[in-house]
Image (cartoon, rainbow, N blue to C red):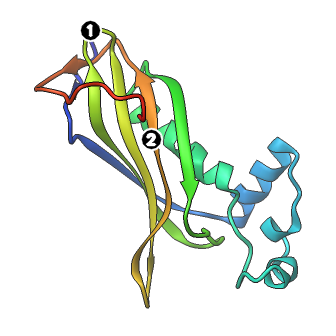
Amino acid sequence: MSGRVISVGKTAVKHVTITQEDVTKFGDLIGDHNPIHSDVEAAKAAGFPGTICYGAFAGSLFSGLMATELPGPHSVYLSQSLRFKAPIFVGQEIDVRMEVTQFRAEKGIVGIKTTITKEDPEKGTVLCVEGTAVAMNKCVTFEGESPEWKNEA
């Protein structure tokens, strides 16, 4: 066992600044060269103030948080659902957040609420991405009670 304890309500947060270099590398990796991600003028023509982060790139940030923090090392990513609510622009700082909503201790399965937010000077905290994930980790200890398992996580 890793000594890590998982309970409903446990959270993990990572602060990330989205850079053009990272967005470009991600686009090259997946073969998506939509100019709204790399060309300011193309992004403006599409109605954005600047280049935007790939939604899939933003969503992939949950994987790193899952592997390092919640549930942590030895985790297996089983599923993820995502809804993109607001664009993330290159240069913005975001908070990638995961929160345990349920678990099945006997199977090592964890249901997780996933969100990405950013701060806007006029609107305050803005929800950019929301979803649910399911992970398996048989090297953690589960503590407390969990709501009955539901398939939405």
The image quadrant of residue 95 is bottom left
Picture residue at 70% right of the left edge, 69% below the top: 52
- Numbered mark located on residue 106 in the image: 1
Q: Measured from the top left, where is residue 39 in percent x and y?
A: 85, 74
Q: Measured from the top left, where is residue 27 in percent x and y?
A: 81, 52
Q: Amino acid at mark 2?
A: Thr
Q: Residue furthest left?
A: 144
Q: Mark 1 or 2 closer to N-term?
A: 1
Q: Measured from the top left, where is residue 149 in percent x and y?
A: 30, 25
Picture residue at 85% right of the left edge, 48% below the top: 28
C-alpha span from label 1 to label 2: 21 Å
Q: Is 94 displayed left or right of 89 in the figure?
A: left
Q: Is 34 displayed left or right of 71 in the figure?
A: right
The image quadrant of residue 119 is bottom left
Q: Amino acid at mark 1?
A: Glu
Q: Measured from the top left, where is residue 118 in percent x and y?
A: 46, 70
What SS does tag 1 mark? loop
Picture residue at 65% right of the left edge, 64% below the top: 19
Question: In the rendered image, is residue 71 in sight?
Answer: no
- Numbered mark located on residue 132 in the image: 2
Query: Which image quadrant: the C terminus?
Result: top left
Q: Is 124 displayed left or right of 106 in the figure?
A: right
